[in-house]
Image: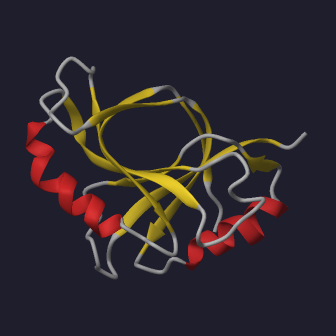
Amino acid sequence: MQPEIKNIGRKKLLGICLEMSLADNRTGELWRSFMPRLSEIETRVGTELYSLQVYDEDYFQQFSPKNEFEKWALAEVKNFSVIPDEMEPFELPGGLYAVFQHKGMDTEIFQYIFSVWLPGSEFQLDDRPHFEVLGEKYRQGSPDSEEEIWIPVSKKD
């Protein structure tokens, strides 16, 4: 499975954030709090949703399922002129990403990306947010679900 390498510009996103770890995964709680409020986002662009993770710089070097990170449920917006209560703006920096098309519910794709594809590629992990784009083919909990996995990369030194 080979990704498409894309260079994107900055994106303005708006949503809700929770601290969590893989051992204490609160993703369901995050999305249950965000989805009923999606219609409150007046300046929304498109229909895609973003599941985004912000990791500390040494998260992958000192990996443990108990390491905490920020996880966001987001929608893209034109601007931050209207921010609903208890939502926060997030500006995604632009840059180079390896984009993997993923179908189904198998999470082993991340094992492949970080232990097979990345070490064998001309890229290294970059210290920017990781995210998944949940488009019209995304179906939570379905084996037919499709999403894009965006991994921040830079050329190896």
Residue drawn at 40 percent across, 61 percent down:
147
Residue 43's place in the image compared with 97, above or below, is above
Instruction: Work out whether residue 114 can be spotted.
Output: yes
Q: Residue at x 91, y 39 (%)?
A: 157
The residue most toward the right is 157
- The residue closer to the viewer here, 24 or 96, is 24
Q: Residue 35 at x, y = what percent?
A: 17, 55
Q: Position of residue 63 (x, y in %)?
A: 71, 66
> Which residue does the image show at 26% across and 70% down from the upper left?
139
Find residue 1 and report its image quarter: bottom right
Q: Position of residue 98 (x, y in %)?
A: 62, 50
Q: Is residue 52 left or right of residue 129?
A: left
* Left or right of 148 in this view: 35: left
Q: Give whichever of 25, 53 is nearer the camera.
A: 25
**Image quarter of residue 145:** bottom left
**How many callouts does the rendering have?**
0
Instruction: From this view, report whether residue 91 is shown above or below residue 144.
Output: above
Say which quarter of the image contains residue 140: bottom left
Asked if residue 137 shows in the view, the reply is no
Farthest residue to the top: give it. 81
Left/right of residue 26 with respect to residue 97 in the rendered view: left
Q: How is the image coloured?
A: secondary structure
Nearer-the-camera pick, 30 or 2: 30
Residue displayed at 51% across by 26% down: 9
User: x, y (%) of residue 19?
Assistant: 43, 55
